[in-house]
Image (tube, rainbow, N blue to C red):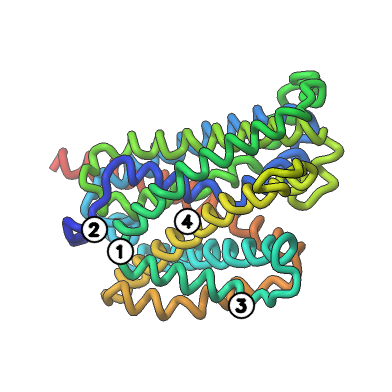
Amino acid sequence: MMVSQQDKITVSQTGIIITNFLLGTGILTLPRTSVEAVKTPDVWLSVAFGGLVAILAGFIMVKLSMKYPEKTLYQYSRDLIGKWPGGLFSLLLICYFLTTSGFQVRSVTEVMRFYLLEDTPLWSMAMVFLWGGIYLLTGGINPTARLYEIIFPITVLIFLIVIFLIANIFDMDHLRPVLGKGIVPVLQGVKTTSFAFTGIEVMMIIVPFMRNPEQALKATLVGISFPIVFYMITVIMVIGALSIDGVTSLTWPTIDLMRSFEIPGLIFERFESLLLVIWIMQIFSNFTISYYAAAVGLSQFLQKRVEPILFALLPVIYLIAMTPKNINQLFQFGDLIGNSAIYLVGVIPLVLLMISKVRRRKYEKN
């Protein structure tokens, strides 16, 4: 894949792309979904183990991609498993990224309507999000990465302010006893927490865009480490403030926790606005990079320029976003995406890596 030098990204930009891709709806929903799976205060351990699984998966993906540093997964999968099987896999991966981007658009519109713009139609909020995304992506991946570099420090700053506020009502007793029911519930929750780290698969697409692809593993480890810390702190603080029972009774527990704060006289009297600011920025990051990954895949599949593909996919993403009829169907949609990620970006890269090693050994023998 030929990428212009101007559109190349640095190691730090790559790490920030991964971080922003992983920090999505999990900030708002992970405390509830993980508690429902684990049913003990040891959820933070499940998040840590889920992060380790993500690091292992990222290691496999990067090792595979570094064998073909000038090609994306869409291209080298055909070299490894043949034109037709590779093409089918590429189409499935494109559909996966499209549904992910559509899910993110619908998620942000649902939350904005519930907390900010109650009478605003979903379609109007979705269109603003979609047109903002395509305006950014037509400039290429380098401007996109530079925007993420602006978003990330703002996210860290506001996140620290939010955690500082929660600390006032944090109760350590809500996190005890540690491993009171053993390790089994913790392990049962690893599958759920692993879903929060889906997004590492983007490394198999953006390695050819890196100026130093040999440092892709470093970028991946750094990119995954930040979300692990973010998610662990979020889960610990939300459970410590609301308790296990309080978390499971709320759809968006992190936002509902922030709504309980009100300090008259300050610029921001309702502090959930701060959390929504960083969350909307992170969802925008998640949406744009999955949108771009799908467009790159389709452009390489059809051997066309990526810019027209971006415009062609815009109505498709809109239709996907508007498919769920209510919030319950939206969560079911998210579970479907998470389950498909296990096979598409969890199992298949491992199989491709094994095939690559077998082929290399045969080549060396010959």
Q: Which residue is mark 4?
A: 285
Q: Which residue is mark 2?
A: 7
The image quarter in which residue 111 lies = bottom right
Instruction: Count residues near mark 2 (Cα–Cα under 10 Å), then give few for <14, some for 14-19, many for 20+.
Output: some
Whichever of labels 3 and 4 marks the residue nearer the N terminus, that label is: 3
For the residues labelled 1 and 2, say whether their Cβ atoms are less than 8 Å apart: yes
Instruction: Say whether residue 202 is left or right of residue 268.
Output: left
The residue shown at (27%, 75%) is 305
Alpha carbon of mark 3 to alpha carbon of mark 4: how far?
19 Å
Whichever of labels 2 and 3 marks the residue nearer the N terminus, that label is: 2
Whichever of labels 3 and 1 marks the residue nearer the N terminus, that label is: 3
Alpha carbon of mark 4 to alpha carbon of mark 2: how far?
18 Å
Q: Is residue 248 above or below residue 39?
A: below
Whichever of labels 1 and 2 marks the residue nearer the N terminus, that label is: 2
The picture places residue 332, in percent across and down from the top left corner, at 71, 60
Helix, strand or loop for disc 1: loop
For the residues labelled 3 and 4, say whether their Cβ atoms are less than 8 Å apart: no
Q: Which residue is mark 1?
A: 140
Instruction: Say whether residue 240 is left or right of residue 321.
Output: right
Report the disc number at residue 321: none
Q: Which residue is mark 3?
A: 124
Helix, strand or loop for disc 2: helix
Instruction: Say whether residue 28 is left or right of residue 256.
Output: left
